[in-house]
Image (tube, rainbow, N blue to C red):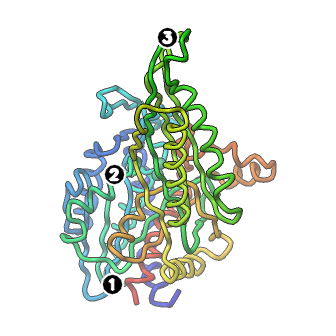
Amino acid sequence: MGTSEAKAADRALRDLDGMLPDLASLYKNIHSHPELSMQETRTAGLAADRLRAAGYEVTTGVGKTGVVGLLRNGDGPTVMLRADMDALPIQEATGLDYASKATASDREGKTVPVSHMCGHDMHVTWLAGAARLLADARAAWHGTLMAVFQPAEETAEGAQAMIADGLFTRFPKPDVILGQHVMVGPSGTVAGRVGPITSAADSLQIRMFGRGAHGSMPQASIDPVVMAASTVMRLQTVVSREVAAAEAAVVTVGVLQAGTKENVIPDEAIIKLNVRTFDAGVRARVLAAIERIVNAEAAASGAPRPPEITTLDSYPLNVNDGAASKRVGNAFRAYFGADRVRETGPAPASEDFGSFGSEWQVPSVFWFVGGTDPELYAKAKEANRLNEIPVNHSPKFAPVLHPTLQTGVETLVVATCAWLSA
Ligand SMILES: [Zn+2]
Ligand SMILES: [Zn+2]
């Protein structure tokens, strides 16, 4: 970290301590008022209010509920900071006094519990805090800051919705795009890497067609239950037999549905599966293998027509640019000290953050901020029980407020200053 970077970051972060009580109450406010994907109007309103109060030009309704704040502060690079805003249809079981009791109507019109069990409430709070601190310290840097609050990360729609709504044409092209996620890890630490940071994810629905008949007369049927069962077993060979030892992939069948009654052979079966990969070539091979196996198993059963394969959602591979992530890593090590900055492997989680950089052809960097009580983490690690700490999407996912809140604001400010103070 150069001296001007350090000076700008220090100047901006001078006021962070005094701001923490306000940020904690913003966090609790958003946490107890979670909103499902593409319904984030209240959260977006809070974000927009904060940006306006800090002096940003604010555009709302980008990709339905997205918010873009611009702070033009003289010549220099443009840095885009992104936070996602949506919550999940999960009944919170953290027992916190600010736990969510909210419900909402999902797309099928069903009433579902809603909670921030992925920590996007933390992301919104971090970005609101960093945006304010950088605005107040604008004398210490120059360039353009672009704060983006994105809808619907959990459904892989939000980034695409903002892009489709003109993100790339209505706003300045950034020189770098930065994003972060709260994860299991000691609070107060940061983890990152060069290269793939989160996996590509593809969810498929497969309809397999047979011919129904009375259960007593299998000869009159083409049994989709056996067809689907055989397909599920054969799909296990994609990773075990077609992916090399040094490569990685996950193929999980999460849904297998057929039939209504024990003595009726149904007409069709449904399989829903999820694929995770860390390399474009491996992804293409795995998806092709699935298609080949599904079609061949249907043919082996004598199916009356080929299976229908539908993509349910698709998250891009999220790849950290080499030079940009080194710049971020150096700035983090200089500010936090090397012991608080960890190197991580690629996470088998997925993120649509990668779409912004890959489609706009802008280097992007994504990192993880620890949200686990450091003492609890150390004890769990010692006892080899790290996998018992509730992870994102668990109904008990509960990042500790301090110093998680502070660290995530610091990371955004420090990384931003690595570009805007040169
Ligand atoms: Zn999530
Ligand atoms: Zn998330």
Q: How many marks?
A: 3
Percent across and percent down for residue 325 are: 52, 77
Q: Nearer the viewer, mark 2 or mark 1?
A: 2
Q: Earlier in the sequence, mark 2 or mark 1?
A: 1
Which quadrant holds residue 211? Answer: top left
Distance of label 1 from label 3 (alpha carbons) = 70 Å
Which type of secondary structure does the marked residue at label 3 adopt? strand
Residue position marked by numbered label 1 in the rendering: 77
Amino acid type for the residue under numbered disc 2: Glu
- Does mark 3 have its CB less than 8 Å from ligand 1? no
Distance of label 3 from label 2 (alpha carbons) = 43 Å
As rendered, which of 257 and 241 lies closer to the eye? Answer: 241
Around disc 2, counting alpha carbons within 10 Å, would you say few (fewer than 14), some (14 to 19), or many (20 or more)? Answer: some
Percent across and percent down for residue 180 are: 47, 63
Distance of label 2 from label 1 (alpha carbons) = 28 Å
Q: Earlier in the sequence, mark 1 or mark 3?
A: 1
In this rendering, the answer to whether 206 lies above or below 268 is: below
Q: Earlier in the sequence, mark 3 or mark 2?
A: 2
Which type of secondary structure does the marked residue at label 2 adopt? loop
Percent across and percent down for residue 333 are: 60, 78
- Determine whether label 2 and label 1 are within 8 Å by CB: no
Amino acid type for the residue under numbered disc 3: His
Residue position marked by numbered label 2 in the rendering: 157
- Determine whether label 1 and label 3 are within 8 Å by CB: no
Residue position marked by numbered label 3 in the rendering: 214
